[in-house]
Image (cartoon, grey):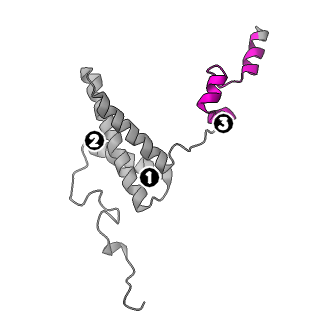
């Protein structure tokens, strides 16, 4: 090295950057909500592989939105009341983050070609994933 550039080592990074903590301030994440938050981060991180810093930020936001969504759902189940606007915003943000992270691009294990069918094709088939021909053939067998 020429002395003007330093190679960053893990010890030179902040605790958040090197993965030792989730937040700059120390926070007890042993509560049920904290454990759920950490579990979701681990699950999403595993699904996308080694994340970039930007992906890691989206994963944290996605985990937060999911915990918030679960809290909204719990309140609805407990009281029957829901803030539809808040729930809609949270769910839409979750969907956008999942799409951005590629979490919707998981292929089905059975490899069914009809799984990629768009909504127009689904409607053309009469609200079925089976083709109209297959449905007509089934009716003839009866």
Residue at 47% x, 52% y: name it. Answer: 46
Q: State left or right for residue 88 relative to residue 133.
A: left
Q: Residue 124, located in which quarter of the rendered image?
A: top right
The secondary structure type at the circle numbered 3 is loop
| Label 2 – label 3 distance at C-alpha | 35 Å
Q: State left or right for residue 85 relative to residue 108.
A: left
- First in sequence: mark 3 vs mark 1: 1
- Can residue 39 be seen at all in this image of the molecule? no
Q: Are marks 3 and 1 in contact (CB under 8 Å)?
A: no
Residue 135, magenta (yes or no):
yes
Dot 2: few (<14), some (14–19), or many (≥20) neighbours within 10 Å?
Answer: some
Spot occupied by residue 69 in the image (x, y as percentages of width and height):
33, 35
> What residue span does the magenta drawing correspond to?
112-139
- First in sequence: mark 1 vs mark 2: 2
Instruction: Report the predominant secondary structure element of the magenta stretch.
Output: helix
Which numbered circle lies on residue 110? 3
Q: State left or right for residue 63 relative to residue 121.
A: left
Q: Quadrant of the C terminus?
A: top right
Residue hosting label 2: 33
Residue 127, magenta (yes or no):
yes
Residue hosting label 1: 45
């Amino acid at each position: 090295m020429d002395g003007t550039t330093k190679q960053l080592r893990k010890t030179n990074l902040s605790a958040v950057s090197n993965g030792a903590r989730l937040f700059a301030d120390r926070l007890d994440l042993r509560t049920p909500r904290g454990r759920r938050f950490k579990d979701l981060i681990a699950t999403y991180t595993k699904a996308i592989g080694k994340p970039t810093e930007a992906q890691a930020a989206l994963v944290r936001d996605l985990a937060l939105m999911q915990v918030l969504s679960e809290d909204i759902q719990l309140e609805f189940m407990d009281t029957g009341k829901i803030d539809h606007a808040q729930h809609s915003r949270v769910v839409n943000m979750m969907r956008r983050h999942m799409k951005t992270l590629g979490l919707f691009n998981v292929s089905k294990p059975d490899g069914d070609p009809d799984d990629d069918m768009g909504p127009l094709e689904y409607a053309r088939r009469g609200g079925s994933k089976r083709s109209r021909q297959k449905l007509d053939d089934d009716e003839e067998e009866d």
